[in-house]
Image: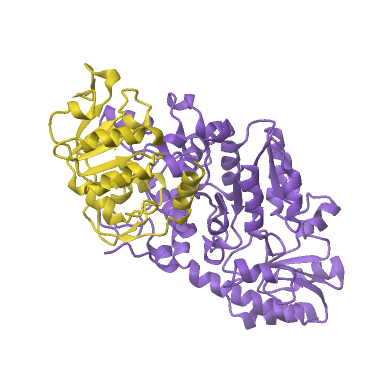
């Protein structure tokens, strides 16, 4: 996978197929990006599992915190890592010891570790880096367009009206709507510098 | 369908505009409402806390305006956009995110006269200090950089003479200085030049001009290229530091490569208030659908009129970058190969009096202070748009006393030339 520019169908396929998501680094503080993403994905119907050893015994929006991936005790489809690039590798190594393996490892905006990605991909796990699943979900469902964001999707089909708890029109096929060269260039420059 | 990238004309018609989910309306509805109901208290709290995407109040966002924002972001190749009440409002909102009192920004000396005024007087009262540089001398930008510099501002095609700015060279200076490059792309429109492709980090427009195209609606827009890293060195606290207005959210870490557009919306538009009317957004959107067709006609007509004027005995000189003899022709070929725009100046051998006489005799050209209309327009900048500059600054900005500015419309070029012929000849 070219991790500088993901095809929409790759991201769409992941968001359509996974049901459970373990979020490593989920925060109970309601202004942290991980809290935003956790709440949003839970509202879209994903089975969310917050992983944070500092908050075991408490819960996040009704879901009990779990100390580590190995403590989940049931299969998970996707691991969403809210950690800096330098802390990615140990999390991926822990994920690779799970049985069964997760189908997807997702690293948040700003997080990228190509060596860890290669390790995961070598055993058939799909990897996404330096993206946010909330933003990607909002983009592909066109929900994010309400914020003036370039969703890069075009469609002549009517989207279902959004209501509480429903999955938006992620299945509606669309034409890619404009390039992302500039934003991907920025992400790449940042990675090369670091 | 695959991830095939659509062309510019397809984006001009479709980007951002999908059939209305509720009614199936194919044209973008005008959501003429101030406010939007919440599903429940948690939904309201999520929206106010920026946790959810959605509509609250039209001063912060509106679904009609959002279509316009996504359309222009797509045409410019940016990650997001924010529509505001005017091009001037766009400039205030952009700089509010970047400058603290006592900071500086570097601006090209060749700008729309209204921008020169805004930067010199209004912004000075905010403690935002403009430092002028010469777009024809790139080293003057380098020399202007200080530790307080927070941004560089240029026009892609510069008012009033239609000169072309070397965006890439100035973007190199900006990158070296660690500041964003802001490009006002009003006179080019993304059909002729896409500044982000040449290194711009932020693009602003007066939508009132070629994008709207019909001279009937004011508007402005800010496009975030998604290219600038706001986190380095704490230089841009509006983006990198916890915002007390939102209980400590850091916008860059939360919104990634469209954080600047979000900052402009939730800190700038929300608090300063220059919201765009949804009706104007609708009018401008309708105009943008035909941007590629209009812009080509504007440019083709402008070239024909410039060639005619260059050969007229009463004309002293013509400044149009589309003419092979023009000093900006090389830059025009590089940055704007489809056409050098439709706004340019010429000077008359008869000086100021001949200019006044010409303007009064023209029958088709309208004498008014706007550009980028379907109609051809004429103005004498020294006595109008640039009148508040002193004489030396007028000459430096290309608006000397003998200069007449034209904005060429989409009429038949033969009729425009005939109108000039009768006005120059008699």
Question: Foreground residue, B223 or B33?
Answer: B223
Residue B161, percent from left and from top: 72, 64
Please tell me whether residue B405 is drawn above or below residue A161 in the rendered image: below
Q: What's the residue at 66%, 53% (across, down)?
A: B170
Q: What's the residue at 68%, 49% (across, down)?
A: B115
Question: Foreground residue, B152 or B49?
Answer: B152
Question: Foreground residue, B260 or B345?
Answer: B260
Please tell me whether residue B309 is drawn above or below residue B73 in the rendered image: below
Residue B90, percent from left and from top: 57, 46
Q: Is B113 placed left or right of B267 in the picture?
A: right
What is the quadrant of the N terminus of chain A in the image?
Answer: bottom left
- According to the colouring, which chain is yellow? A
Residue B293, percent from left and from top: 49, 72
Color scheme of the displayed model: by chain
- According to the colouring, which chain is purple? B
Q: Is B20 placed left or right of B89 in the picture?
A: left
Number of disc labels: 0
Residue B425, can we see it?
yes
Residue B144, percent from left and from top: 75, 44
Question: Foreground residue, B251 or B270?
Answer: B251
Q: What's the residue at 27%, 36% (across, down)?
A: A93
Residue B407, can we see it?
no
Q: Residue furthest top?
A: A57
Please tell me whether residue B5 is drawn above or below residue B135 in the rendered image: below
């Amino acid at each position: 996978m070219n991790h500088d520019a993901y095809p929409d169908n790759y991201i769409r396929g992941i968001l359509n197929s996974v049901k459970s998501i373990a979020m490593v680094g989920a925060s109970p503080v309601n202004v942290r990006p991980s809290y935003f993403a956790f709440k949003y994905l839970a509202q879209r119907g994903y089975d969310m599992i917050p992983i944070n050893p500092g908050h075991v015994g408490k819960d996040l929006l009704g879901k009990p915190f779990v100390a580590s991936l190995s403590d989940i005790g049931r299969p998970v489809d996707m691991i969403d890592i809210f950690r800096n690039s330098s802390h990615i590798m140990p999390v991926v190594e822990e994920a690779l010891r799970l049985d069964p393996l997760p189908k997807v490892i997702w690293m948040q905006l700003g997080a990228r570790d190509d060596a860890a990605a290669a390790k995961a991909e070598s055993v058939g796990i799909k990897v996404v880096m330096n993206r946010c699943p909330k933003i990607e979900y909002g983009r592909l469902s066109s929900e994010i367009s309400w914020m003036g964001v370039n969703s890069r999707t075009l469609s002549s089909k009517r989207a279902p009206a959004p209501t509480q708890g429903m999955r938006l029109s992620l299945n509606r096929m669309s034409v890619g709507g404009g390039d992302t060269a500039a934003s991907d260039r920025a992400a790449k420059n940042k990675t090369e510098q670091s | 369908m695959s991830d095939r990238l659509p062309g510019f004309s397809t984006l001009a018609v479709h980007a951002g505009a999908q059939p209305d989910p509720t009614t199936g309306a194919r044209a973008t509805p005008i959501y003429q409402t101030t406010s939007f109901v919440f599903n429940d208290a948690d939904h309201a709290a999520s929206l106010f806390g920026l946790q959810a995407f959605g509509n609250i109040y039209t001063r912060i966002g509106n679904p009609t305006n959002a279509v316009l924002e996504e359309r222009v972001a797509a045409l410019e190749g940016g990650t997001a956009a924010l529509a505001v009440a005017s091009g001037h409002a766009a400039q205030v909102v952009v700089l509010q995110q970047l400058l603290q009192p006592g900071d500086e920004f570097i601006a090209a000396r060749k700008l729309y006269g209204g921008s020169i005024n805004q930067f010199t007087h209004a912004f000075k009262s905010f403690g935002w200090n403009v430092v002028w540089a010469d777009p024809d001398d790139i080293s003057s930008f380098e020399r202007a950089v200080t530790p307080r510099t927070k941004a560089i501002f240029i026009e892609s095609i510069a008012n009033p003479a239609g000169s072309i700015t070397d965006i890439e060279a100035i973007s190199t200076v900006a990158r070296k200085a660690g500041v964003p490059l802001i490009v006002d792309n009003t006179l080019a429109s993304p059909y002729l030049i896409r500044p982000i492709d040449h290194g711009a980090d932020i693009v602003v427009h007066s939508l009132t001009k070629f994008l709207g195209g019909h001279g009937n609606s004011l508007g402005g827009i800010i496009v975030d290229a998604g290219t600038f890293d706001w986190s380095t060195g704490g230089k841009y606290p509006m983006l990198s530091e916890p915002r007390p207005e939102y209980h400590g959210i850091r916008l860059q870490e939360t919104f990634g490569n469209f954080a600047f557009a979000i900052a402009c919306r939730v800190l700038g538009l929300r608090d300063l208030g220059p919201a765009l009317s949804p009706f104007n957004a609708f009018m401008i959107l309708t105009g943008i659908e035909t941007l590629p067709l209009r812009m080509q006609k504007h440019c083709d007509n402008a070239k024909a009129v410039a060639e005619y004027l260059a050969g007229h005995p009463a004309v002293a000189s013509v400044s149009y970058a589309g003419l092979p003899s023009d000093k900006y022709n090389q830059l025009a070929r590089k940055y704007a190969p489809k056409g050098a725009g439709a706004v340019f100046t010429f000077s008359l051998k008869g000086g100021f009096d001949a200019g006044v006489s010409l303007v009064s005799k023209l029958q088709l050209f309208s004498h008014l202070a706007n550009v980028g209309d379907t109609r051809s327009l004429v103005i004498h900048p020294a006595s109008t748009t640039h009148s508040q500059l002193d004489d030396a600054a007028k000459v430096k900005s290309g608006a000397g006393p003998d200069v007449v500015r034209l904005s060429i419309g989409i009429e038949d070029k033969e009729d425009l030339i005939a109108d000039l012929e009768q006005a120059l000849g008699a």
